[in-house]
Amino acid sequence: MTRRMVPLTPKGIGACYCKIPVENGQLPDPANWGVADVVNYFKATGFEEQATAFQDQEIDGKSLLLMTRNDVLTGLSIKLGPALKIYEYHVKPLQTQHLKSNAS
């Protein structure tokens, strides 16, 4: 595992470049993240205020991978705008990455 600068948001959205652990050009599998890892991920991607909601609800990596759009929009008590971005640009892609890496 190496540390290098990687974009944490899709191109055209205004990428946030942060030093985080990277494996083969991808983020580590969120299934192995603890609550602190989830919180740090969202802080690093520019959602510092919203990251506390994941800590308050004790969302670890496995829980993050099980979250639905509705969970993020209503279950975390986050304002709608940031909640939509968190789900569409972070939770959903992390879930997709996890499914693809475990399918092979």
Image (spheres, rainbow, N blue to C red):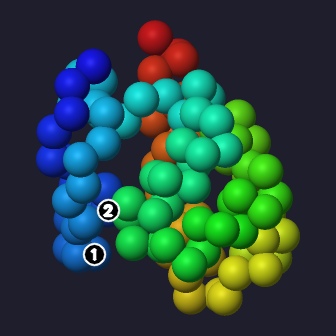
Q: How many marks?
A: 2
Cα distance between the residues tagged 1 and 2 = 7 Å
Q: Is residue 84 visible?
A: no
- Type of amino acid under label 1: Ile
Q: Residue 13 bears which disc, if any?
A: 1
Please tell me which residue lies in front, 48 or 88: 48
Q: Is residue 51 left or right of residue 29?
A: right
Q: Is residue 79 left or right of residue 15?
A: right
Q: Is residue 17 left or right of residue 55?
A: left
Q: Is residue 94 visible?
A: yes
Vertically, is 56 above or below 65? below
Please tell me which residue lies in front, 27 or 53: 53
Give x and y (percent) for residue 18: 24, 55
Vertically, is 104 above or below 58? above
Residue 24 picture quarter: top left
Q: Which residue is mark 2?
A: 9
The residue carrying pointer 2 sits among few (fewer than 14), some (14 to 19) or many (20 or more) residues within 10 Å by Cα, namely: some
View extreme (left): residue: 5
Give x and y (percent) for residue 62: 70, 34
- Type of amino acid under label 2: Thr
Q: Which residue is located at x 21 percent, y 33 percent?
A: 3
Q: Which residue is located at x 64 percent, y 36 percent?
A: 34
Secondary element type, mark 1: loop
Q: Which residue is located at x 78 percent, y 80 percent?
A: 77
Q: Residue 48 bears which disc, if any?
A: none
Tags 1 and 2 touching, CB below 8 Å = yes
Give x and y (percent) for residue 70: 78, 68
Secondary element type, mark 2: loop
Q: Quadrant of the N terminus?
A: top left
Residue 60 picture quarter: top right
